[in-house]
Amino acid sequence: MEMLARTALHLLLLLLVAPLLQGVIVRTKALFAGRVGAPLLQPYHDLARLLRKECVVSRTTTWVFLAGPAAGVAVPILAALFMPFGALPAPIAFTGDLLLFVYLFGVARFFTVASALDTGSSFEGMGGAREVTFACLAEPIVLFCLIVLARIADALSLTALLGPHLAATWRGPAGLSLGLVVVCLLVVLLVENSRIPFDDPNTHLELTMIHEVMVLDHSGPPLAMVLYGAALKLMVLGAPIVRLLLPVNTGSWAGDALVFLGGMLLLAMLIGVIESIMARLRLVRIPQVLIGTTMLSGFALVLVLR
Amino acid sequence: MLAALILLPLLLVPVAWLIPWYRVRSWLLPVAGASHLLLVVLALGGVPDAAPGEWIGLDPLSRLVLLVASPLYLGCALYAVDYLEMRRERGNRTMVPCLLLFLSALSMAAMSRHLGLMWLALETTTLASAPLIYFNRNRLSIEATWKYLLICSVGIALAMLGLLFFAYAALRGGVPVSLLLSDLLAAGPVLSRPWLHAGFVLLLVGFGTKMGLAPLHAWKPDAYGEAPGLVGALLAGGLTSLAFLAVLRTLQVMNAAGALGMARPLLLGLGLLSLLLAALFMMRQGDFKRMLAYSSIEHMGLLAVGVGIGGLATFGALLHMINNSLAKGCLFLSAGNIHRAFASKRLADVRGALVALPFSGALFLTAFLAVTGTPPFGIFLSEFTILRGIFGAGRLWVGLAVLVLLATVFIGMGASVLAVSQGEPTERDMAFTDRFLLVAPPLLLLLAVLFLGLYIPESLRLLLEQAQALVEGGA
Amino acid sequence: MTELSNLCLLLVILVNFFALGSSRLTACIQAVALQGAVLALLPLATHGLSSHSLLLAGGALALKGVFIPWLLLRAIREVHIRREMEPLIGFVPTLLLGALATAGAFIFADLLPLVEAHQGGLFIPTSLATLFSGFLLLISRRKAITQVVGYLILENGIFIFGILLAEAMPMMVEAGVLLDLLVGVFVMGIVLDQINREFSTLDTEQLSALKE
């Protein structure tokens, strides 16, 4: 029974809070630009509006086209089951679940790219190629980071990796590596969620788009699913960063959840700040930055291995 | 008295900078050079060897280097007076202070008994000589200056790391960390070997760069080719001797630690490589000042081979250091005259120097004979001694290789020098003639080389033996 | 105090990576300034407050952190050069080489016969890694100014090693070393200016007239 309640809380947190984070990011950026900005709950309205709209599907497409948005929502929910939210342990934990976690997102990416290719548009193919290229470069970073954490925790499940030992680790000699891991994960978060400086979610020029260009042909409820899936992904991938930065165990469910939520909101604000003060990188520079980050994560690994 | 050797030129730097009279400023150089030489002569007789713990002091090695560098500097300083007169358009407000600073740093490097201090002085010589190379202010000289600065700075930085490795060897050996030469020598046997070896390699790379040993010689042809003759003379005669002294200092430490067996093959290898490269590049050299740079590389190689073999060859190398400095002085100064007169240093443009400039041309030709080891000049004697040392040590193949390479150098260099001096004069700048101060200093330097070939004073032989014992005795 | 020095050393390594991967000259110079300033903390963190460490820290901060970067920034402001366009070895390969060198330095430092107190520390590997990075920058870039930056990073690597052995270098010598560095960069700055005047570029590829 308790198990069920935990799972429900976990999923509810995810499903309800995720769009709010997008609202916070937009609001932070608006404040930085000196505007009032859209209300915090605007993403919920947007989703509702899109769900009510009619869905237009190109005649050249097949079921693959709709599988993309579906996978985009399903995978983050599934992945969230392995990811602890702050001090709240993950509903499912077993040795090696971190690999499953990493490759679940690979599945989602496969479907997104396949659905983009399914339209037969050259723009979407280009976006797909870029998405996959950058994902290839981002994947080693995640793995290195997880290996570092696994080495520190001496365990192989995400819940154990992000366990209560982190607070002590920060003060110990491995704290340096932990700092590097946070930086690397932040970079991955920005890449995977198509944020500035790697991609601009608000761009209007197809040639410069990466993620957005792949979903150009979606409309109505599928588009809502794409947007919702993106919000979920941001939250799931942001969760380990929040946990690393706020390794607090209050002892009660409510307290843990509140700490986690506060952390997520702060993280969203941080993303907003980053988006406000940085310009988008040129496309050719992105692989360089990603490789640099890979080296950082590799360096963090060297530090904990010696 | 020793402090005066360093401070006197240093004090003259601001004076030279401030006084407004061009001619007087030029004359500051010989004044400084002459008083320096006077002080050196007095110090050689009057100042006892340094006691352990002193930072500045003399020992046979530093006496030798001072004995070489000071007369060479005076010669170049006298030459500079007329040279600067001739090139008034360039001004001497940079040249003179830099040359004075160079003298000060040179004395400090020669006399410092603290390796850090020595490093400092060597680096200062690099910095002081960079503006000198840029004297001609054209594209080529700027390129040469840039390469010189960058390569030598990096080299000397590596030498600093090598010094720190020596210090770490002491730390690891459990003795108080110090870079005083006397402390390091005393701690010799307990120094940690791996650090010592690594440090020696780095120091050899660092000081070898300054010496111009192949394959670290890349800056040398450019810098010597583009610098005015007198700067080339100072670099090839003075600076390289200082760098060689620095190498000898590290050898002293290696000897005290009983690690000469590791150091010698490295020196020998670099030395032979330098000889080989110099011989190869000298064969088809179309620029006679660059050719002189390769000659300098050759002689540095010979020095390295000498100390790499040890024993009598080290004695020969020390003697060779003296001869080489003096002969290089003469060679560069007379080559500078020819360069001025013909306004070119390409072999294709320069012919008949003997007719056009009877004195400078003859000096250049004779200095070539001296520097390639023709009897009766001193270099013949020192090269012969080194070769005797090599064969005496049973290194037949090394000796033969050196002989063959020396012969190649003679042929290669001879072809160029003869082409420059013989034949009908090509078109040239008629305003330039042999002036007294442009000819007398190289002549005196040449006479000194000749004298050393005919007779080595007993006191000098004693000094050389003491110096040799310092480098590799008693281990 | 070990934590402070470890943090500093980590920052130093990050700056190495940044300098290797960045094409913007201004950013490179600012990174080196940061590195110099961070290095200034190290003597204090390792040796505590003594006149020697204070002098070292002050000297490093003033020269490596402020004055030399200022000189370089001034130099590039006058020559209107912003980017290192075509390095001899690309940015990604140099980054990878730098990472390999850094990892190698860490492994190598574990094999070295170190004194008890330095074993497992970050000092020696960081020093070696910084040295390599500087060297890499020096040989892989065309712009004269980036080469100066490489030289500075190389010097910084040696400086880190020197901090471990502060007793070996008396104060006088240390001050002289810093002064020499300053004068060296100053002279390089003048030469840079002259290169720019003669060639209207700071590309060292232009400096290739002298060869056999």
Image: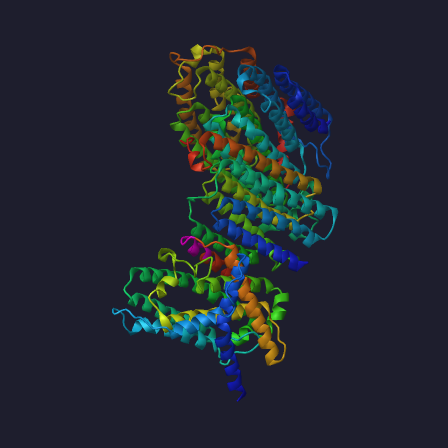
**Vertically, is A212 above or below B317?**
below
Q: With respect to residue B180, does C106 lie above or below?
A: below
Identity of the residue furthest to the bottom in this view = A1
Q: Is residue B98 above or below residue A77?
A: above
Q: Quadrant of residue A79?
A: bottom left
Relative to A43, B43 lies left or right: right
**In the depicted view, which residue is nearer to us: B21 or B356?**
B21
Q: Is residue B439 magenta?
A: no
- Answer whether residue A286 is magenta in the image: yes
Front residue of this view, candidates C119 and B274 = C119
Query: Is residue A238 something one can see in this rendering?
Result: yes
Position of the N terminus of chain B by quadrant:
top right
Residue B285 image offset from top left, x and y in percent: 40, 27
In percent of width and height, residue A221 lies at 37, 73
User: Residue at 49% of width from left, 10% of height from top?
Assistant: B433
Q: Magenta stretch: give its range.
A: A282-289
> What secondary structure is the stretch in magenta mostly built from?
helix
Q: Position of residue A2 (x, y in %)?
A: 54, 87
